[in-house]
Image (cartoon, rainbow, N blue to C red):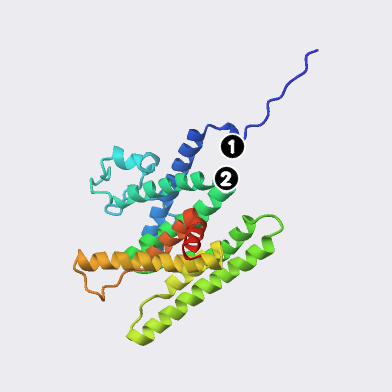
Amino acid sequence: MAAICYDEPMTIADIPPWAVYIFAGIFGSLLGSFANVCILRMPAGRSVVRPRSACPLCGHRLSWWENIPILSFIVLHGRCRSCRGHISWQYPLIELLCATLAVAVWWRFGQPLEFFVYLCLLIVPLVIVSFIDLKHRIIPDSISIPGIFVGVGAAVLLSVDGARLSAAIDSVLGAVVGGLTLFLVATAYEKLKKQEGLGGGDIKLIAMLGAFFGWRASIFILLVSSVLGSLVGLVMILVLRKDMKYAIPFGPFLAAAGIIYLFFGPRLILWYLGLIG
């Protein structure tokens, strides 16, 4: 009697790389669609779950095929099917941004756990925070404060076995160092200039990033975000003729610096230490 052979269960390694990248992009675009809902509703204190998505102009409830990330915008030619009003370019651009970042996260880590943790719990919240801050000059506490605790949990979860205690300590120190440093800078600026320079939302956001990456990363993120903010501010003054007192939201620069650290931070730190050492 012939022996019965059972196939080995399929693993990630058995899936063609191009298929994994396609999945990552599709999953990222779906998260981008959810990010759009959060960006629209959170500043108004509305639920991000109910009711389902609708046209902001006429209230037309979107059917499933009108809510497919990127593709629906193309099929509908950027217009509402009901009132023919223009659909903001923000929607497909954020979906495309999240899809691109998802592919980049898989390229960087290539492991499901790191992919889901960093994409769902860090990058997408940073995208949401950045666009809300750009539009409304606020950073929702409902993202940054839970994000601090999520960051500590993520640091422990992704740590090497046997190093979880040190990962937790480094994470907590990252939140404290980042938040305290920016708090002192904001306080000093307010006393010198007699006006508020940085809001509490920025302080909580850097604490969240420090919790994910540790205290060394907090310093890196603060330095890089300051450089990015200074460069953008200089461009706005020289090109757009803005006044030097023109307020620029700092949250997007912190978010950008955090994403830069995620992909290149340790290498950039080693490169810099090589330059000075």
Q: Is mark 2 on a helix, strand or loop?
A: helix
Q: In which quarter of the image is residue 194?
A: bottom left
Q: Measured from the top left, where is residue 180 in percent x and y?
A: 50, 77
Q: Is mark 1 on a helix, strand or loop?
A: helix
Q: Measured from the top left, where is residue 241 in percent x and y?
A: 18, 68
Q: In which quarter of the image is residue 81?
A: top left
Residue in the picture at 48% in, 76% down: 181
Query: In this orientation, does residue 140 appear?
Result: no
Instruction: Spot the residue most to the right.
Output: 1
Give the camera-side residue of 45 and 210.
210
- Residue matched to label 2: 112
Is residue 272 found left or right of 9 in the rendered image? Answer: left
Give the camera-side residue of 138 and 103.
103
Is residue 214 found left or right of 226 in the rendered image? Answer: right
Q: Quadrant of residue 246?
A: bottom left
The three-letter code of the residue at mark 1 reads Ile
- Residue matched to label 1: 12
Q: In which quarter of the image is the N terminus?
A: top right
Query: In this orientation, does residue 40 appear?
Result: yes
The three-letter code of the residue at mark 2 reads Pro
Cα–Cα span, label 1 and label 2: 9 Å
